[in-house]
Image: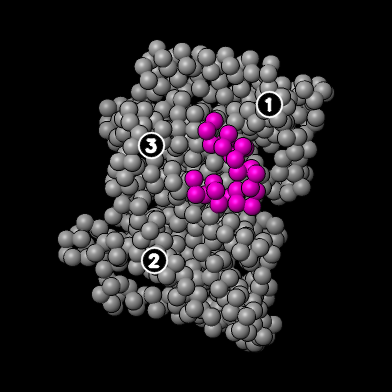
């Protein structure tokens, strides 16, 4: 019983991190209708920003989040303006291929500039735990969960309480109508992509504090973002949170039930199952993307 | 190109490929075998993505299934290579039918991602099912007893045979009722259904055919390499490579994907295999250039009978915001 509760707590805490990984990915997909296969490697890019500050200046990894977000925002904004924007109206499949090419390019650049070595930026309190009743909770994981929730709340407020956020939401719902009321689509797209990239950067900082990372992990993190988005569904800010929690619980639960090596089978099985049974996801709304024939 | 010129060009090219080994040394036999395998993969993907309009992003799953079925049949059942590879094709086609019914209902991104999910799922299962597949340690296939030159020749002709079969199958499909049905559902699926085209059946048949040839190529590859592991036969990088070849030549045309494969694989073998550290970046860059500037491939230049900067810029104008 106790091990199940502990697994559930771990799964929920991990879910917060996954929600953060999936948030930007879902934003790009929902607003631009672009599935960004370079999302995972942008997460890794954020992890490198954190690692550089941690290694060079000895900054606590969680304090580097604003920096990695700013760097990735600029990167994403420019990328949208210069590259993604050129194919944003092409058939959906073309955007998949283009961003895959982009991923290869960034991975190669990282392998060149930072080598394939695994890096990590563990803070001083990486091993600390607190007791909550009968349960032992790692401080770092709890902090990461709190930071992920805080960032999600900030994004929520931005989207619903500011004009610029409203413009982004409107563009996602109906591009032509938004254009008619005076929204600059190209700028809104670049803004959305920039914010999505900033979230990738934040997720990267969190990952750097908890796990070892290397350029080749870009692909696996993209797949996690897929799962979070598909399971949670597009069209609501709560989607990635639900998706993240489900993935976190599925991974820790699957590991407990079948063993560590079967975690991938469980999570990809879940992805395929959801796509067959309920492709719009748990919270997905119909109008966000055409799902079925 | 006019019909008669095209036919003559194809006849000459086919004859040259059949007689090629008379003058080719081992290096070139290897390069061409690799080109044939990629061309067959691009042509197989073209059947579902080009003719049917369903971009099965994770089609490499059938390559892996073909490679593993071939390996397991040769090792556990002692089957000869040709029979084992055919068995792989049949297994892959059956898998395509089973997953096709639920997955081919999905549209756009969702379909592409579902095929990606299936590839990752099957890769993960093969990696874990150590007793049957060798798991993450991979599978070593028997080496053919035919001498070095004999082995090179066998795989050259085996790969060429798979390529020819995939081209002939594509030609037959394009000219048959099936081809008309596929084209109608590609251009307007609801409309096709309304006039009585059995869309679900046709899509599934197309995907099974695509899977069959993809798996045959996998079967040749597995025995040629004599070693396979999940990470390299279920590799999305491989999928993206043959997808870009098909795009480069012209998706939906009969010969385009083959031409794309010859161009890209020759370039890859001769030019940037010299620069291993930037291999990935070079391929990534080519992918981006193809998608942005020539999404309809060489076929577009032939159709427009010109090759100008204006054509590239027109493509960009169409797709940007």
Nearer the observer, B96 or A156? A156
Q: Which residue is mark 3?
A: B296
> For this rendering, which residue is in front, B312 or A51?
B312
> Within the image, what quadrant is residue A187 found in?
bottom left
Query: Label 1 belongs to which residue?
Result: B29
> Label 3 marks which chain's residue?
B
Position above or below: A286 against A239: above
Residue at the (41%, 32%) spot, across then down: B298
Nearest to viewer (mark 3 / mark 1): 1
Q: Which chain is mark 1 on? A: B
Percent across and percent down for residue B287 are: 48, 45
Q: Check contact, mark 3 vs mark 1: CB within 8 A.
A: no
The circle on residue A77 is 2
Label 1 sits on a secondary structure element that is helix
A249 on left or right of A238: right
Across and down, in percent, residue B105 comes to: 41, 41
- Please state the extent of the stretch shown in magenta in the rendering: B262-286
Indicate the position of residue B113 as horizontal and vertical percent values: 48, 49
**Dominant SS in magenta:** helix
Relative vertical location of residue B207 with respect to residue A21 in this rendering, above or below: above
Q: Which mark is residue A137?
A: none
Q: Residue at x 57, y 24 (%)?
A: B163
Neighbor class of circle 3 (other Cα within 10 Å; few <14, some 14-19, many 20+) is: some
Quadrant where the N terminus of chain B is found in the figure: top left
């Amino acid at each position: 019983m106790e091990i199940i509760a502990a697994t559930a707590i771990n799964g929920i805490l991990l879910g917060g991190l996954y929600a953060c990984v999936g948030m930007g990915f879902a934003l790009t997909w929902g607003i631009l209708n672009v599935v960004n296969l370079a999302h995972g490697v942008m997460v890794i890019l954020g992890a490198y920003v954190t690692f550089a500050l941690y290694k060079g200046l000895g900054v606590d990894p969680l304090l580097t989040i604003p920096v990695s977000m700013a760097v990735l925002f600029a990167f994403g904004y420019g990328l949208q303006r210069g590259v993604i924007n050129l194919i944003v109206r092409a058939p959906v499949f073309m955007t998949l291929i283009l961003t895959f090419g982009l991923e290869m390019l960034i991975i190669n650049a990282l392998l060149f500039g930072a080598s394939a070595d695994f890096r990590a930026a563990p803070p001083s309190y990486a091993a600390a735990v607190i007791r909550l009743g009968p349960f032992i909770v790692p401080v770092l994981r709890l902090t990461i969960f709190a930071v992920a929730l805080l960032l999600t709340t900030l994004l929520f407020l931005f989207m619903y309480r500011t004009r610029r956020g409203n413009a982004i939401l409107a563009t996602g719902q109906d591009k032509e109508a938004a254009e008619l009321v005076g929204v600059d689509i190209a700028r809104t797209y670049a803004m959305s992509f920039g914010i999505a990239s900033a979230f990738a950067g934040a997720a990267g900082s969190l990952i750097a504090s908890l796990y070892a990372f290397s350029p080749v992990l870009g692909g696996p993190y993209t797949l996690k973002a897929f799962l979070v988005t598909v399971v949670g569904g597009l069209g609501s800010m709560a989607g990635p949170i639900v998706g993240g929690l489900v993935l976190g619980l599925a991974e820790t639960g699957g590991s407990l039930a079948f063993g560590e090596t079967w975690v991938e089978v469980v999570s990809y099985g879940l992805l395929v199952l959801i796509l067959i049974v309920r492709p719009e996801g748990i919270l997905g709304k119909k109008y966000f993307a055409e799902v079925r024939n | 190109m006019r019909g008669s010129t095209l036919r003559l060009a194809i006849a000459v090219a086919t004859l040259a490929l059949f007689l090629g080994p008379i003058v080719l040394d081992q290096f070139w036999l290897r390069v061409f075998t690799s080109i044939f395998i990629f061309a067959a993969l691009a042509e197989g993907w073209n059947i579902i993505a080009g003719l049917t309009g369903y971009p099965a992003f994770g089609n490499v799953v059938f390559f892996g299934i073909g490679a593993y079925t071939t390996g397991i049949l040769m090792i556990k059942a002692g089957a000869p290579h040709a029979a084992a590879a055919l068995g792989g094709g049949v297994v892959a086609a059956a898998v395509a039918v089973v997953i096709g019914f639920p997955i081919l209902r999905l549209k756009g991104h969702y379909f592409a991602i579902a095929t990606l999910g299936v590839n990752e799922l099957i890769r993960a299962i093969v990696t874990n099912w150590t007793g049957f597949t060798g798991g993450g340690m991979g599978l070593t296939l028997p080496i053919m007893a035919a001498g070095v030159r004999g082995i090179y020749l066998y795989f050259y002709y085996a790969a060429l045979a798979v390529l020819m079969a995939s081209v002939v199958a594509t030609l037959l499909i394009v000219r048959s009722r099936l081809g008309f049905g596929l084209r109608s559902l590609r251009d307007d699926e609801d409309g096709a259904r309304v006039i009585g085209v059995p869309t679900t059946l046709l899509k599934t048949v197309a995907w099974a055919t695509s899977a069959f040839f993809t798996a045959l190529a996998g079967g040749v590859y597995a025995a040629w390499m004599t070693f396979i592991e999940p990470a390299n036969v279920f590799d999305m990088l491989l999928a993206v490579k043959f997808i870009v070849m098909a795009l480069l030549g012209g998706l939906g045309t009969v010969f385009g994907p083959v031409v794309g494969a010859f161009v890209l694989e020759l370039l890859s073998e001769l030019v940037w295999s010299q620069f291993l550290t930037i291999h990935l970046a070079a391929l990534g860059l080519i992918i981006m250039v193809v998608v942005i500037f020539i999404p309809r491939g060489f076929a577009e230049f032939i159709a427009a009978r010109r090759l100008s900067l204006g054509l590239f810029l027109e493509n960009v104008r169409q797709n940007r915001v």
